[in-house]
Amino acid sequence: MSQDDVVGQTLDRAKPILSKLTFGSIIGYCSGVAAQKVGRAVAVLAGLSFIAIQSAVYSGYVDVDWKKIQDDAVKSVDTDGDGELTVKDIKSYWEKVKKILTHNIPNASGFSVGFLYGVSAR
């Protein structure tokens, strides 16, 4: 490898970071990127659905009890039963997801960091 090779130089500079990569952190990153893409698609579909329903409500075609929908939605995801969606609930769901995604994965210790990095990647 020549001294002028940009990729080689970059890899040499990144050696301390690359040596800390684990299988868990790599699959965590890939899973995070995938979750971000799926999450965006779900958000678009949910937003478009809301726009269509709310347009029908505004036009007088249907009546929607948004308060009941909100209460039912919160109740379905409220893991601690306090009637609110809190950080504790989100942490509970994260632990369930992490348990599923790291089951039987060797060296999954870096999964969470990789996942968080993947979700936040642009």
Image (tube, rainbow, N blue to C red):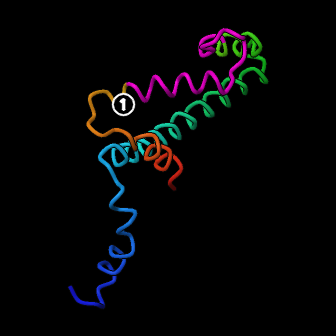
Q: Nearer the viewer, residue 82 or 52?
A: 82
Image coords of residue 14 (percent x, y): 38, 70
* In the image: residue 48, left or right of residue 19: right
User: Residue at the spot x=75%, y=16% of the render?
Assistant: 66
Q: Residues within 10 Å of mark 1 (few under 14, many from 20)?
A: some
Q: Nearer the viewer, residue 87 or 46?
A: 87
Say which element carries label 1: helix
Q: Main secondary structure of the magenta part?
A: helix
Q: Nearer the viewer, residue 8 or 33?
A: 8
Residue 35 is inside the magenta segment: no
* In the image: residue 25, left or right of residue 118: left
Is residue 63 something that shows in the picture?
A: no
Image coords of residue 1 (percent x, y): 20, 85
Residue that badge 1 annotates: 101
**Which contiguous range is marked in magenta?**
75-99
Q: Is residue 2 above or below residue 84?
A: below
* In the image: residue 12, left or right of residue 71: left
Q: Quadrant of residue 98?
A: top left
Image coords of residue 121 (percent x, y): 50, 54
Q: Is residue 2 above or below residue 37?
A: below
User: Residue at the spot x=50%, y=38% of the render?
Assistant: 41
User: Residue at the spot x=29%, y=46% of the render?
Assistant: 23
Q: Quadrant of residue 4?
A: bottom left
Q: Is residue 111 above or below residue 96?
A: below
Kind of residue at badge 1: Leu
Q: Quadrant of residue 99?
A: top left
